[in-house]
Amino acid sequence: MIECKAVSKTYQIGDTVTEAVRNICFKAQVGEFVVILGHSGSGKSTLLSMIGGLTRPSGGQVAVAGEDIWQWSDNKRAKFRNQTIGFVFQFASLIPTLTVLDNIALPSLFGEGMTRAARLRARDLAGIVGLSDKIDSYPSEISGGQQRRVAISRAFLNDPRIVLADEPTGDLDEATEAQVMDVFTGMCRQHKTTILMVTHNRDLIKSADRTLVMKDGAIL
Amino acid sequence: MGLLWLATQNLSRRAFRTVMLAAAVAVAGGAVFATTVVLRGIDQSLTRGLNKFGADLLVVPQNALVNMKTALLTGEPSTFYMPESVIADARAISGVTKVSPQLFLATANGQHCIVGNAFLVGIDPATDFTVLPWLTNKLERPFVGGDAVVGGNSPYGLGGLIYFYGQYFIVYGKLDRTGIGLYDNAIFISIDRAYGLAEAAKKYEDVPAFGFKRGDVSAVLIQIGNAAKANLVRFALARNPEIKVITAGNVVTSVRQNVAVLFGGTLVLTAVLVIGNILMITAIFSSIVNERRRELGLLRAIGATRYGVFQLVEAEALTLTAMGSLLGIVVGAVLLRAFTRTIGYNLELLNIPFLWPSLAEIGVLAAAIVCLSMLVGTIGAAYPAIVGSRMDPYDSIRAGE
């Protein structure tokens, strides 16, 4: 499903060249739940952004279903992000001017359009993460943990084949963290969704099928 | 629901900023709208009024050029005379199709005339082609000797009775308002009755003698056949050193020169407002795009194309400028309405003809201002929109971390 071949990313600031990701090679199968473990600055978020078509690698290939996504046009990659990928970022990443329901349904705006069906699905997802009573609230009116759950619901709106989650439980309490992990594992098992989750929390390893450890931009 | 929905959500949830920006656009849009309406009124008045004038050439005594222009534009009584031989001379020129004389005289103040210091114009009903053919508001019978035609500003209605020097006239027709003083303020009677009035006035000791004798005329209006060349006719007429030939274009040019400063000032004002608004929108939307980097990066992450981000920023600018310009037009219209009299009075002081454009024309002007404002919004937001669309999504998402 996902194959990284010698993927690397370097940043140049002035004369200083920093290798954020170095020669990463790995595969993730359909329905596999992979946790990428590493400390802050180990390059795991950068790797996730390259797999998700957000940051162009400096070298190597990122193939999804056998196709190098960085050979595609920008529009095709945008469609890929909309239809195939679900992102959960480190921070809540909600649009402050939209309600919880509209935030969850937002990806449909760039696909089928924000249809009634999309909003119904968004409502269902809000129910799954326990936010049925908050769908008309704005992000500023709910807690950080609730905002995170909204972002997770949004990632699943288009039934993506791949979910890329960057520290999705970062600022959640234990009970909510368990609830969120149940959502991830449930989706992974029921819908054969491939999940790549980046975290520094070793407790999350138990939910994963496989764990990769990153340090200084490389997989150990 | 699409990007426009998202744009309106963004605008409505940031109400204070939206209202302030819309107000800034409204000030500019309202100012341009109000000045455009006034200028259109002046231009329309000149064009319509002088088209109605109908004559290609106007012959007046050599020294009466300035007085004639004043008489035409303001309707102030002007009196100057020349021999009637000019009529025959004009008719004899090849290419001339219509010739009609006019005689100008002023009414006396006091009890002898119903309106004092009014501009009376004697026309020849048999040859006139500048007054009677334009009458739509008239009695259902032909014009006769005892009739008068009043201008659009006159308080007298059809069938009313007016008198000058003991002579009574029935108001036969009333001209539509044109903004041109002569047609709005003057009173037209037959030239024969005008000569008669001069005779009648002699019996009043307090009325000074009119400076003409029967047969004299003040102006001769000439229409030229399509094939004829106006310059050739003018050249032929100019052989008479006692006369001066004026074209309608001369008068329009003369007035336009008078209002050139106004036109020029308005153009500069419009240009300054347009450029100022473009710069303001560019600056503010650059700030907005920068402030919302993470939001735009997020939209890219969930499927927005670069063009989609560009469209979103542009949609916000378009919505904002459309709202602002509509608000400006409403405010501009209210101010125009409130200052209708002042505007008319001040333009009259400057000898500038003015006629309010029709509602349909004002509507078209308003639509044009909205379109112009939206164009300003599009141009102003273009650079920030391009910058926003080209930002690296991942860098944008991590902005501020």
Image (cartoon, coloured by chain):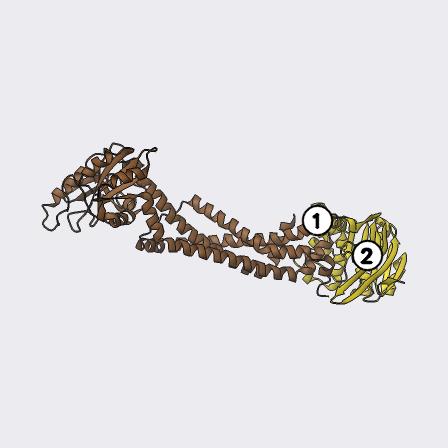
Q: Amino acid at mark 1?
A: Phe
Label 2 to label 1: alpha-carbon separation: 29 Å
The amino acid type of the residue labelled 2 equals Gly
Q: Position of residue A60 (x, y in %)?
A: 83, 55
x, y percent for residue A77 = 75, 50
From the viewer's perspective, tell me whether residue A19 is left or right of residue B264.
right
Drawn colour of chain A?
yellow
Q: Which of the numbered marks, if any, corresponds to residue A110?
A: 1
Q: Are marks 2 and 1 in contact (CB under 8 Å)?
A: no
* Residue B61 in the image: above or below residue B15: above
Residue B118 visible in image? no
Q: Secondary structure at mark 2?
A: strand
Which quarter of the picture shows residue B224? top left
The answer for which chain carries disc 2 is A
Which residue is found at the position 54% from the left and 51% from the top? B375
Chain identifier of the residue bearing label 1 in the image: A
Say which chain is brown.
B
Residue A182 is situated, as x and y percent measured from the top left of the image, at: 84, 57
Taking the image as drawn, is residue B163 in sight? Answer: yes
Tag shown at residue A59 = 2
Residue B192 coordinates in the image, percent (x, y): 17, 37
Q: Does dot 1 land on a helix, a strand or a loop? A: helix
Image point 25% across, 39% down: which residue?
A: B237
- Residue name at image x 44 percent, y 54 percent: B267
Which residue is nearer to you in this view: A53 or A61? A61
The 10 Å Cα crowd at callout 2, few under 14, some 14 to 19, many 20 or more, is some
| Residue A213 versus residue A2 in the image, above or below | below
Depicted B329 relative to depicted A43: above or below: above
- Mark before the other along the chain sequence, 2 or 1: 2
